[in-house]
Image: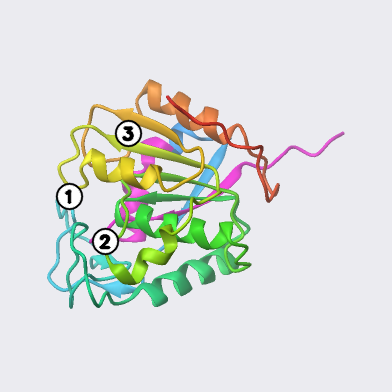
Amino acid sequence: MLEAERPLRLLALHGYRQSGRRFHQRTGALRKALRGRAELVTFDAPHLVPGGGEEDDGDGGDPPRGWWFSRPGAFEAAEAAEEPAGLTEALRAVEEALEKLGPFDGLLGFSQGAALAAMVCALRARGDPRFPVAFAVLVAGFVSRSPAHGHFYREPIALPTLHVVGEADAVIAAPLSMELARSFVEPVVLTHPGGHFVPVGAPQKKAYLDFLGRFRAGQGEAEMPGAGAV
């Protein structure tokens, strides 16, 4: 009898002013929708953010964390930071999570976590062995405005991605997420009418499953991606 294929495993990168535990709680509906097909594993960003509160509603609990700062102790996605701080530690944290909590097949990123996941995708597409992932799902992502991060986008990123874009997102406006999608080779784009959250309605569930259906656990590389919007 053939051994049953394990579900895909996705390393999940939370948003700014969130934590791994918070993001685990916030993605309960998504984890239920993907049950049997994919597992999400969350972990904490390396940097504590001064002054509590989460990027969306600050409902208490774990200290808020971030992946990098555009100025000391703070972050704004639209800020073209001349001296961003903390990205090296963030990439190291992802590398260590992939190694210690793995194996993983792909990434799921939300907001600042999606921006970081895109950078990881760029490094992986260039052959960086620290980040053995085959695809990413990027929710409310954006291109870093920092000139120091420009090298991540200097060439189209050849790794399969699903970009989830909220048309009413007041935190990361839809054009910013679409700009990130255009940084990839043949991205798949999923728009939804909502705001700054991970949508899990019936249309989104189908799009997630369709995208993840292109991959196999431990495959290491996927089918050639196809462009499109869903």
Numbered tag placed on residue 9 in the rendering: none
Amino acid under disc 2: Arg
Left or right of residue 95: residue 224: right
Separation (CA) of disc 3 from disc 2: 26 Å
Mark 1 or 2: the one toward you = 2
Q: Is residue 138 above or below residue 210?
A: below
Q: Is residue 11 magenta?
A: yes
SS assignment at label 1: loop
Left or right of residue 34: residue 197: left
Image coords of residue 54 (percent x, y) = 18, 57
Residue of label 1: 56
User: In the image, what residue occupies the spot 17% across and 49% down?
Assistant: 56
Image coords of residue 22 (percent x, y) = 30, 55
Image coords of residue 96 (percent x, y) = 53, 71
Q: Is residue 2 above or below residue 102?
A: above
How many residues crowd around disc 1 within 10 Å: few (fewer than 14), some, or many (20 or more)?
A: few
SS assignment at label 3: loop
User: In the image, what residue occupies the spot 32% across and 33% down?
Assistant: 199
Residue of label 3: 199
User: What's drawn in magenta, residue-wise?
Assistant: 1-30
Amino acid under disc 1: Asp
How many residues crowd around disc 2 within 10 Å: few (fewer than 14), some, or many (20 or more)?
A: some
